[in-house]
Image (cartoon, grey):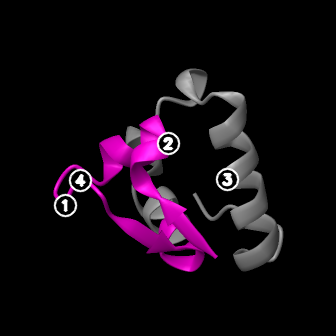
Amino acid sequence: MKVRVENFTQLRDLCWNRPANTELDGRDALAIYERNWRYVDKDALDGEERNLLDMLVARYGNGVLNV
């Protein structure tokens, strides 16, 4: 699964030091969310990004978000 960083506001903010049109493997995207969760504005997660996060957790995190 590939995740286009620019389509997700919180993920884009977490990837500030990567090139603009970055695509991440789903496992890598979940790792970035988990590693930087303290910087995620949970109230600003829109439905699409929340669905992405739920899907990443289910697929790569065995149902657990390690934060």
Amino acid carrying mark 3 in the image: Leu
- Residue named by callout 1: 19
Res 5 seen here: yes
Q: Residues within 10 Å of mark 4 (few under 14, many from 20)?
A: few
Total labels: the figure holds: 4
Query: Are circles 1 and 2 on residues that touch, CB within 8 Å?
Result: no
Mark 4 or 3: in front is 4
Mark 1 or 3: in front is 1
Amino acid carrying mark 1 in the image: Pro
Query: Are circles 4 and 2 on residues that touch, CB within 8 Å?
Result: no
- Residue named by callout 3: 53
Picture coordinates of residue 20 (x, y %)?
Answer: 23, 53
Amino acid carrying mark 2 in the image: Phe
User: Which mark identifies residue 9?
Assistant: none
Residue at 59%, 21% (x, y): give it.
43
Q: Residues within 10 Å of mark 3 (few under 14, many from 20)?
A: some
For residue 63, side relative to residue 28 (left or right): right
